Amino acid sequence: MPDLPGLPVPELLALDRRHVWHPYGPMPGRVDPLVVESASGVRLRTSSGDLVDGMSSWWSAIHGYNHPVLNEAAREQLGRMSHVMFGGLTHEPAVRLAKLLVDMSPKGLEHVFLADSGSVSVEVAVKMCLQYWRSLGRGGKQRLLTWRGGYHGDTWQPMSVCDPEGGMHELWSGVLPRQVFVDAPPAGYEEAYAEQLRAAIERHADELAAVIVEPVVQGAGGMRFHSPAYLRVLREACDAHDVLLVFDEIATGFGRTGALFAAEHAAVTPDVMCVGKALTGGYLTMAATLCTPRVAEGISRGEVPVLAHGPTFMGNPLAASVACASIGLLLGQDWLAEVKRIEAGLREGLAPARELPGVQDVRVLGAIGVVQLDHEVDMRAATQAAVREGVWLRPFRDLVYTMPPYVTGDEDVARIARAVCAAAKEG
Ligand SMILES: *Cc1c(COP(=O)(O)O)cnc(C)c1O
């Protein structure tokens, strides 16, 4: 057996290519990934040198890497127990986390299901909604309505509400549950579009269990922003027509858009809300599905009066402890000032991209910056251009984008913005 920890990079890459799947990757792999040796603050130590992380490891590492407070929370919990089953047992980290989530999330969400990934939390949300209507004797309400351009994860139900054209699940049309799609939301408020939402919900009300959307920012489906006013339109139409409303805040939660949860931009409480990604500060995989008493009580009135879901690693104490510490860090600082600071830095730093040939749009909201091209990005060229600027980016489709850790200093924000521009130019 090779001595893995000391494995030279070329050998490690050869084994990686031969044996290891990467996200949305072929087997064997065709592009050599960078090897990360360690990470600290906002820097990844890689086989291509130190890189400022412009991705927060896909929205999650909001406090940066190797954070002393999060490390300590993990170490302390490790000394007690890393995991115990959650059936018939409970523990302080999970209870504390649930209470924190209830206290910080939109008013009215009071019950928490701790899941082990974002996709699973969406599965649970869908199951809650379907089970709610079944309990009330309206088992015909089984479909979901969403707008195009969304992303909700890669397992079955979440895939069925991802963008039907842009997403990978195009492969699965005919196999996936058939959901109801309306057009993607325009950036600004348009009454005609609001009417389309209302009409679609009314028309399909008898078969709809829920409307599910990402509020304000659609992430991996296309990095589109829309007016929060549409969330109020959805809330009113759902209430008028007996349809539940699910917000997927897995990407937007924990301050990313300049509100703790994007639902706050519209002062709307959904019936069910999913959080994940930044929940543990990027340390461990955990997500949560929150719901209102109406949903929980509805389920409890059914012939099967329980929520029929229970993952092996539900409520994992290690992840829950780090999540509590991460939320403590977030709320213990002026996080909004940090997000606004990054927003201002990205606005300034990305402005020059507007002048580049091939750039269709530049948009910034909270600690999210997006440059949209008028063509599919050349991923290899774009990534290399960013690496030359000392930054890690992961463009996709026609998008070069960044959502830096909130602890990114002004100089590093400027560097990230330069890298996004360089990637847009070369890509
Ligand atoms: C990432 C994401 C998911 C899926 O979460 P995983 O932890 O990757 O399963 C679902 N919804 C949204 C909005 C996301 O950004």
Image (cartoon, grey):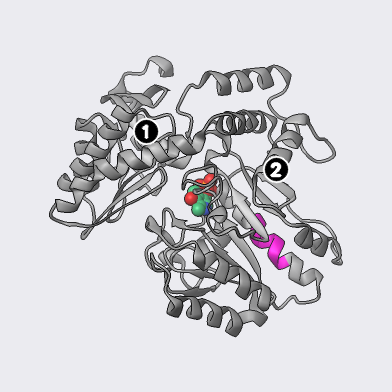
Q: Are marks 1 and 2 in contact (CB under 8 Å)?
A: no
Q: Position of residue 368 (x, y in %)?
A: 38, 46
Q: Position of residue 387 (x, y in %)?
A: 24, 32
| Residue 142 visible in the displayed image | no
| Residue 309 visible in the displayed image | yes
Q: Position of residue 308 (x, y in %)?
A: 76, 56
For residue 193, above or below residue 370: below
Q: Is residue 320 magenta?
A: no
Residue type pointed to by label 1 = Asp
Q: Is residue 125 magenta?
A: yes
Among the 4 quarters of the image, the one containing residue 189: bottom left
Whether the residue under disc 2 has CB within 8 Å of ligand 1: no
Q: Identify the residue at image location x=41%, y=40%.
A: 340
Label 1, label 2: how far apart the Cα atoms are: 43 Å
For residue 410, above or below residue 424: above
Span highlighted in magenta in the image: 124-130
347 on left or right of 40: left
Magenta residues, dominant SS class? helix
Question: What mark, if any, has residue 103 been given in the picture?
Answer: 2
Q: Identify the residue at image location x=47%, y=75%.
A: 182
Nearest the viewer among 269 and 397 is 269
Q: Position of residue 374 (x, y in %)?
A: 21, 60
Residue type pointed to by label 2 = Asp
Question: What mark, if any, has residue 16 been given in the picture?
Answer: 1
